[in-house]
Every structure is written in C-alpha cells, then in structure tokens.
Amino acid sequence: MKQIECYIVQDLLPLYIDHACSKLTAEDIAGHLQSCENCKELYEEMSSNICSALQASELDSRKIFRHAKKSILAIILALAAVISCFVINTGGAWTGGAADISNMIVTILYVIFWSVFSVLSKEYMPLIKISFAISFITFVSAVFGLISRAFHIGGFITGILSVFSSIPFYGLRFFMDWTGLYTAVAALSLAWLIYTLYSKRALERTTDLKGD
C-alpha cells in the first residue's frame, strides 16, 4: 500500500467523504486512516459536520414546503370566502334595499374570516401582502362610498368603485343605512390595514435579525 503524507490526506478528505475520488485513492486514504489517529479524528469530525449540514438543509426544505402548503391553502380559502360572499350578496347590494338575515350571516362570517386570516398570516409575507391588498382595496372602496353619499354621486362607475365594500358588507344593511355601512367598513378595514402593516414590519425585523 502506498504511503501518503498527512497533509495530502487532509486535503483529499472532502473528496473522500463525498466519494468523489478514484478507487485507488480511496483505498490509499482508507489505509492511512487506519494507521493515523490524527487524520482519523479529522475525518470523523468532517463527516459529522457534513451530516449535520445535510440534516439542517433537509429540515429547512421541509419547513419551506410546509409554509408553502399553508400559504396555498390560505389563498384558496381567502378566494373562496370572497367569491361566496359576492355570490350571495351581489343581488341585494345592487338593488340597494335592506338586507335579510342570510346576508347578515354571510357578512359576519366574512368579517370573522378576514380577522382570523390577518392574525394567522403574520408569519408569512405572501399572506400578509394579500391581507394588506384586500384591506387597502376595501378601505379605498368604503371611503369612496362615503364621498359618493356625501356629494350625492351616483351611477354605474360609483357602484363599481364601491363594490368591495358594498357587496361583502351588505349584511350590515340589516342594521343600518348605506352611510353607516361605509363608515363601519372604513373603520374596520383601517384597523386591518394598521395590523397588517405592523405584522409586515415585525416580520421584516425578525428576518433581519436572523440574517445578522
């Protein structure tokens, strides 16, 4: 068996551990490790470090996959909530009359869903962005609805611009008039906006600290 100097073996250990060297070289290194305690200890330490790195990488991949699944599921539920609410409330909101009990229940469920969604999304940036976008659109829609009521602006365009507040929250017409509805929606969506902005900044700070 060919004798190899320790410094050569130590340089080749990464290749040996990864099974990336030739068969003859591997045999020479294996023989050297049997007779050299220093190189053997280094080999065992390097093998342990590589295994730990691989396990950590695998755990990170699993964590990312779990986060991705939660994000996709949450997005699907959010879309389902929006679509369901629009389907049930569109007719009554467009005619402008008082809401019935079914509209009220749908609106209450909609408010509960988005409140829970905003809280649960605080650890996932994609979901925070979705929550922020919906909250912002709803707030702008409610403010426009209030302006249209204050200045008696009507028409098709007004109806389209206020649709994200008038339809999902149409169930509030069971208790109040349109002015009250837009006021309540503006306040609620503003609270959502503030919370999502706080969640976004908190997550960014946490990410920065982990990066440091």
Image: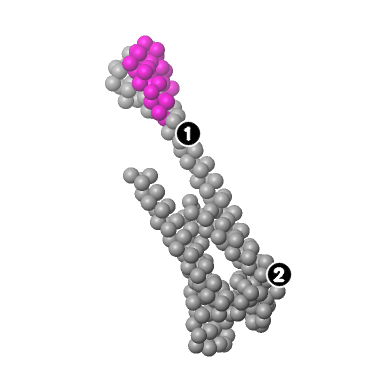
> Could you tell whether 120 is left or right of 88 in the image?
left
Which element carries disc 2, helix, strand or loop? helix
Q: Residue at x 46, y 34 (%)?
A: 54
Instruction: Determine if residue 139 is in view.
Output: yes
Q: Amino acid at mark 1?
A: Gln
Q: Name the quarter where the C terminus is drawn.
A: top left
Task: Identify whether 14 is placed above or below 189.
Answer: above
Which residue matches tag 2?
102
Q: Which residues are magenta?
A: 21-50
Q: CA distance from mark 1 to mark 2?
A: 52 Å
Which element carries disc 1, helix, strand or loop? helix
Q: What label sits on residue 134 in the rendered view?
A: none
- Horizontal and vertical percent for residue 151? 50, 88
- Horizontal and vertical percent for residue 158? 54, 83
Crowd around label 2: few <14 · some 14–19 · many ≥20 (10 Å):
few
Viewer-proximal residue among 8 and 46 = 46
